[in-house]
């Protein structure tokens, strides 16, 4: 049922270096907090890993405080594509993925270059984005069976009318 | 001209591409004309409030109570306050201009499978949500919005929570802000949503769609087969 993911998506394992540049700028903007936040962000950047598998995404970061998030494509509720002007100057954007577990974003994909392609990929795997993923499989199964039976009935009727016509001759 | 320059400088992306769906089902809505005036009004009121508050604080520096604070501190705080007030006044034309841009750069795209909403200037936000994940629809409109013929439509997905966390709620909702033909838009979304009877969490009680019953079809085959036998064995 799950089809393999496109190679350009599977190839993503790390954020691009520009993300670190953005982190530096952000920490600078925080002035006094700079020494603390830059360390946190430095480790976050250097340990951030993505794995895009056939079923879902795994994202992990951190050394002392490890984080690992796994989510299924089919469980994605909505996709947010966000960026501020600084990020856009660097060619970056964030993709925030929401599932139904509540609260804020369940996963934020950072440091991706082609965010639009990623968004389209995630969209294609979302529930309800294509006919394949929508609808009750049992319902479509019985609909197909009923359709075949109707066809058989129509064939039989055609044979009967044909033989009746022959008899009359 | 200046507007174009500003948008280029802020690297605001162009009009969003509609999400996948059948091409003739795509409909793009924009905020109503009055939404601009609505924005200007709320902007004006909030700015007036800020200026008034600043002026009051500045006046407060001269009253009897604060006279007891040593002179140098009083002078410094007065200068800070004055600088703040000037900054607010200077930002007025910029934020005024932003209201117009914010009104113009809004797209609400509705297809047969999903919604996409784009908004924002400095911070650009784009949301995509499929009907399959929609939980409920809400149309709200205040008295002033009602006078201007505007309404907000909020399409929510699961997980927004009923708590006080506004940002979490917002992340789980698509907001069609300040639309003019709210009823028509709501009906359109509701009509398209109806085709996704399994939308949201939880299963509907009835089976999806009143599909052909295989049992009835099989009986029809049997009936035909009998009639055929009757016809061939020469009744």
Image (tube, rainbow, N blue to C red):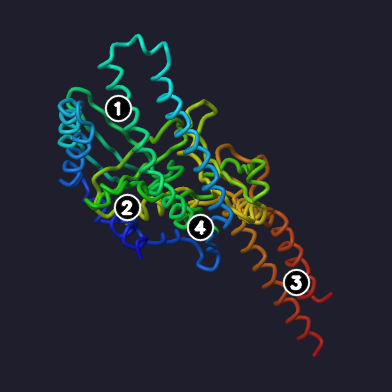
Please name the residue that numbered disc 2 is placed on.
Answer: A118
The x and y percentages for residue A11 are: 21, 51
Q: Nearer the viewer, mark 4 or mark 1?
A: 1
Q: Residue furthest bottom?
A: A169
Taking A37 as reference, is B207 left or right? right
Res. A60 image quadrant: top left
Q: Chain of mark 4?
A: B
Decide which of B203, A43 is in the foreground and name it. Answer: A43
Direction top: furthest residue: B68
User: What residue is disc 1 on?
Assistant: B79
Q: Are marks 3 and 1 on the same chain?
A: yes
- Near-viewer residue (B211 or B24): B24
**Is label 2 in a helix, a strand or a loop?**
helix
Pointer 4 local density, CA inside 10 Å: few below 14, some 14–19, many at least 20: many
Query: How far separated are the C-alphas under marks 3 and 1?
Result: 103 Å
Q: Quadrant of the N terminus of chain B?
A: bottom left
User: Is tag 4's residue or tag 1's residue first in the polypeptide sequence?
Assistant: 1
Label 3: chain? B
Element type at mark 1: helix
Q: Which mark is residue A98?
A: none
Measured Cα–Cα span from mark 1 to mark 2: 50 Å
Q: In this figure, which residue is indicated by the disc labeled 3?
A: B228
Label 2 vs label 4, nearer the camera: 4
Work out whether B16 lies above or below B194: below
Vertical order, B235 against B209 (above or below): below
């Amino acid at each position: 049922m799950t089809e393999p993911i496109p190679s350009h998506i599977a190839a993503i394992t790390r954020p691009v270096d520009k993300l670190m540049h953005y982190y530096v700028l952000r920490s600078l903007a925080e002035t006094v907090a700079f020494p603390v936040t830059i360390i946190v962000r430095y480790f976050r950047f250097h340990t951030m890993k993505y794995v895009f598998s056939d079923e879902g995404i795994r994202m992990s970061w951190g050394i002392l405080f490890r984080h690992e998030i796994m989510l299924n494509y089919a469980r994605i509720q909505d996709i947010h594509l966000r960026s501020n002007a600084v990020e856009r100057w660097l060619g970056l954007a964030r993709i925030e993925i929401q599932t139904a577990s509540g609260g804020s974003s369940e996963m934020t994909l950072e440091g991706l270059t082609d965010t639009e392609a990623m968004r389209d990929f995630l969209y294609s795997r979302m529930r309800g984005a294509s006919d394949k993923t929508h609808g009750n499989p049992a319902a479509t199964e019985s609909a197909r069976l009923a359709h075949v039976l109707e066809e058989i009935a129509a064939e039989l009727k055609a044979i009967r009318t044909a033989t009746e016509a022959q008899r009359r001759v | 001209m200046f507007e174009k320059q500003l948008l280029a400088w802020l690297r605001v992306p162009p009009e969003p591409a509609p999400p996948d769906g059948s091409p003739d089902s795509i409909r793009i809505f924009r905020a109503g004309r009055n939404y601009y005036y609505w924005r200007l009004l709320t902007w004006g009121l909030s700015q007036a409030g800020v200026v008034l508050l600043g002026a009051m604080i500045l006046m407060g520096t001269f009253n009897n109570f604060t006279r007891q604070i040593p002179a140098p501190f009083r002078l410094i705080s007065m200068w800070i306050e004055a600088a703040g007030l000037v900054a607010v006044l200077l930002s007025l034309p910029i934020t005024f201009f932003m209201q117009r841009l914010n009104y113009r750069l809004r797209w609400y795209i509705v297809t047969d499978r999903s919604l996409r909403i784009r908004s924002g200037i400095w911070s650009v936000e784009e949301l995509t949500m499929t009907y399959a994940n929609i939980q409920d629809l809400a149309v709200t409109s205040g008295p002033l919005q009602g006078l201007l013929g505007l309404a907000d439509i909020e399409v929510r997905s699961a997980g927004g929570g009923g708590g006080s966390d506004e940002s979490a709620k917002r992340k789980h909702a698509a907001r069609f802000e300040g639309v003019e033909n709210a009823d028509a838009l709501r009906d359109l979304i509701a009509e398209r949503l109806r085709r996704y009877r399994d939308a949201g969490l939880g299963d509907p009680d009835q089976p999806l769609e009143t599909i052909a019953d295989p049992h009835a079809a099989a009986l029809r085959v049997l009936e035909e087969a009998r009639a055929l036998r009757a016809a061939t064995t020469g009744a």
